[in-house]
Image (spheres, helix red, strand yellow):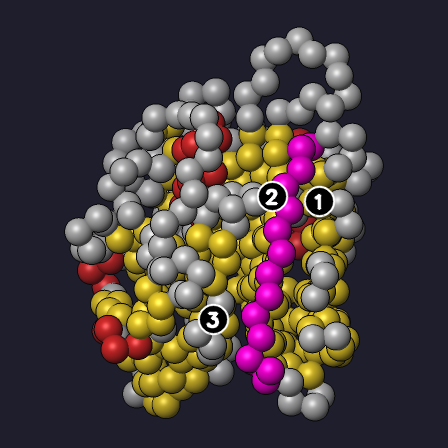
Amino acid sequence: MWLRLTIFVAFLAGLAPGQDTLFRPALPGYEFEFPRDHFSHPEFKTEWWYYTGNLRAADGAAFGFELVFFREAVPNPFGNPSRWKTDQLYIAHLAVTDLRDDRFAYAQRMRRGALDLAGATVVPGYQPGRAAEKSKSEIHNPQYAMRVWIGDWSASMAAAVHRLNARAKHIAVRLDLVPLKPPVIHGRDGVTPTGPGVGNASHYYSLTRLQATGTIHSAGRDYAVTGLAWMDHEFTSNVPGPLQKGWDWFCLQFDDGSELMLYRLRRPDGSTDPYSAGTYQPPEGPPLPLEPAQFRLQPRPASTWESPHSGGRYPLQWQLQIPVLEIELDVTAAMARQELITNETAGVTYWEGAARATGQKGGKTTVASGYLEMTGYAPSRAWPR
């Protein structure tokens, strides 16, 4: 979701809400093209590659994981010849939910895009400007490669395989992800609006069903795992305004082969912002954009979990209704303790973790797994100007 770096953008850049005029705005009419748009877009101020998923080992152990890389452009007009000079900062968050052992651990990094400390680059041979000249088969099955990294943490894309590699003190992921569906573009006319006015939008797409294989490290053990993952990629130059206090974001993968992405932007008074939205991807065929009037999303107050670390109070059970799709779901966090306090990097406190859904879809019983993200329920540290 576009607001994931709200605190980071607003305070690090020291900008007023609205469009950062030093960078390219996200405007209607943008035509996505792949593999080009899997790669970095430095003409936009803020960008991220966001991977989550639910995995299982042969012995029944179940895991959720999150690995995300943020790129933030920082205007640097000074004529400093130092090799340390940069106009890009990179942040990464890694988290593993160990559902069998009721463990949650996370790690974070931030480095400048200089001296090969971090970056987002394309391997030699790929020419983004010529992608439109290539055949559709070449674009759909690219032999080109891109890599975003911070130190030895990385997400690389080559030959339609996404490879994740990150290790911290107690957790690690090493996964190969193969898309089972083409990219799903959210919003309309190439943009996802985030507010009124020109440029108050982002370019946002997802890989909604990735077959995952590899290794998870948790509690001193390596587990061979398989499962499903999800990838969000979003880029924008918009600086969030004060009308949205936080958001509740869901991605769900149903047992019938369909997927759902949905988010509710919350205003300070608790009401739903009219720029909330979603996308339903059927097992086959084009995606269906969803407007706020088409769905109803409500937390169950009795399910609230209070963090002993931040004091944030997070609803762990949700009721979701989408009449146009005959969907009625109960969505529940797979484990309560999945909060990240990222004071060392983005300065944002948020809850993100594995979730499960049960209910009715098209008149039939359905189940789904996915991820839930909640922000604005706990104070976040403001970056110094």
Residue 163, by quadrant, is: bottom right
Q: Is residue 174 visible?
A: yes
Q: Which mark is residue 150?
A: 1
Callout 3: helix, strand or loop?
loop
Q: Which mark is residue 49?
A: none
Q: Is residue 370 visible?
A: no
> Which badge, 2 or 3, is on the more N-terminal residue?
2
At x 49%, y 24%, the residue is: 23
**Residue 356 located left or right of residue 294:** right
What segment is highlighted magenta in the picture? 99-113
Choose between 99 and 19: the one closer to the eye.
99
Residue 14, by quadrant, is: top left
**Residue 310 located left or right of residue 70:** left
At x 74%, y 12%, the residue is: 81
Circle 3 residue: 337
At x 64%, y 81%, the residue is: 56
**Residue 370 located left or right of residue 114:** left
Q: Residues within 10 Å of mark 2 (few under 14, many from 20)?
A: many
At x 73%, y 24%, the residue is: 84
Q: Position of residue 137 (x, y in %)?
A: 69, 54
> Which badge, 2 or 1, is on the more N-terminal residue?
2
Circle 2 residue: 91
